[in-house]
Image (cartoon, helix red, strand yellow):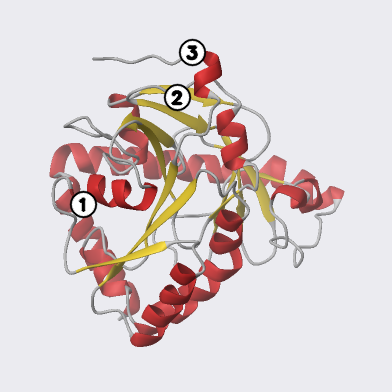
């Protein structure tokens, strides 16, 4: 049964759960990457970007489940335990993929409710959301059974620069559903660019609501968008752009005329190739091909 809320009810505090796969591999490619060096580098990014962005959210509705492998090193377990004691997150250690219905029970446990509307959003352990991420979500009448909200605009940074990027089917989509339903839907119910097949999607424009960090060990993220001045967005991403020098007028022009069109062509070709590969080979076979290419690159 579909349950539609009034505008007033939708703006009330609805429990929200951020979901993070810290070192639970989604495929064989990621499984090979999650070694000690990777973990040491990733915890630095996690503490610089991800942690403060979640801590900035309204604690009345904010919850956080972080999934880790049960073979995680003791130093990582200790660090997660300290954050759990602080009340910021709940670490869950797994030996394999989540069993059917297990995520639903974890969300019930962390929110303390058995039924009713809950929202969820994926948050990778090297990315961040704006300080007003949940506040903006509450300002829009969208929360109902099996619905979703996506903030179309976000930011992408690397070591030296920042880009503004419009990407409605981004990995930060917020999904709402009722905890008591049998086929409970979350942001992990499908790939982020296919969630629209399962839920009614509301697209919200406006200022950047999320940040993707591009670094050497990214599996899929890459520089995209329009070169921009970080000072415009620092209030919603405090402390995350202090080491970035604002681009000059010449750098902006060069990026707009040459680099941005080149990136769009690259992304279009990659997107077409990936979708064609999935249709012909299937996602598992595509992951195996990526795995072999990565191993050759490192050889």
State whether residue 33 appears in this view.
Answer: yes
x and y percentages locating residue 165 in the rendered image: 60, 41
Mark closer to the chain start, 2 or 1: 2
Mark closer to the chain start, 3 or 1: 3
Residue, disc 1? 286
Residue, disc 3? 6
Residue 53 or 205: which is nearer the viewer?
Answer: 53
Residue under the image location 55 percent in, 63 percent down:
51
x and y percentages locating residue 117 in the rendered image: 37, 30
Residue under the image location 52 percent in, 36 percent down:
167
Give the answer, above or below, for where 37 lies relative to 289. below
x and y percentages locating residue 252 in the rendered image: 77, 47
Dot 3 falls on a residue whose secondary structure is loop
Q: Which mark is residue 143?
A: 2
Dot 1 falls on a residue whose secondary structure is helix
Foreground: disc 2 or disc 3: 3
Residue under the image location 59 percent in, 55 percent down:
53
Local packing at callout 3 (Cα closer than 10 Å; few below 14, some 14-19, many 20+) is few
Residue 143 or 226: which is nearer the viewer?
Answer: 143
Mark closer to the chain start, 2 or 3: 3
Dot 2 falls on a residue whose secondary structure is loop
Taking the image as shown, residue 2 lies to the left or right of residue 40, namely left
Local packing at callout 1 (Cα closer than 10 Å; few below 14, some 14-19, many 20+) is some
């Amino acid at each position: 049964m579909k349950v539609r809320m009034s505008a007033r009810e939708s703006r009330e505090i609805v429990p929200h759960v951020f979901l993070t796969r810290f070192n639970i591999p989604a495929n064989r490619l990621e499984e090979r990457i999650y070694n000690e060096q990777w973990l040491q580098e990733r915890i630095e990014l996690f503490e610089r970007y991800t942690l403060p962005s979640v801590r900035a959210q309204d604690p009345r509705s904010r919850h956080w489940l972080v999934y880790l492998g049960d073979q995680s090193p003791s130093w990582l377990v200790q660090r997660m335990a300290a954050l759990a004691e602080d009340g910021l997150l709940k670490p869950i250690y797994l030996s394999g993929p989540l069993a059917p219905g297990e995520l639903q029970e974890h969300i019930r446990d962390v929110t303390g409710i058995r039924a009713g509307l809950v929202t969820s959003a994926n948050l990778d352990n090297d990315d961040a959301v704006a300080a007003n991420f949940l506040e903006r979500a509450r300002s829009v009448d969208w929360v109902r059974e099996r619905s979703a909200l996506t903030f179309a605009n976000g930011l992408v940074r690397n070591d030296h620069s920042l880009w503004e990027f419009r990407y409605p089917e981004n990995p930060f989509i917020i999904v709402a559903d009722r905890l008591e339903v049998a086929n409970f839907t979350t942001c992990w119910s499908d790939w982020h660019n296919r969630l629209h097949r399962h839920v009614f999607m509301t697209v919200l424009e406006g200022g950047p609501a999320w940040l993707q960090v591009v670094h050497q060990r990214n599996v899929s993220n890459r520089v995209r968008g329009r070169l921009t001045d970080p000072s415009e967005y620092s209030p919603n991403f405090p402390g995350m752009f202090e080491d970035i020098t604002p681009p000059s007028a010449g750098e902006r022009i060069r990026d707009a005329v040459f680099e941005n069109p080149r990136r769009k062509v690259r992304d279009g070709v990659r997107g077409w190739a990936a979708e064609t590969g999935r249709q012909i080979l299937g996602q598992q076979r595509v992951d195996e091909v990526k795995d072999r290419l990565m191993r050759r690159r490192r050889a």
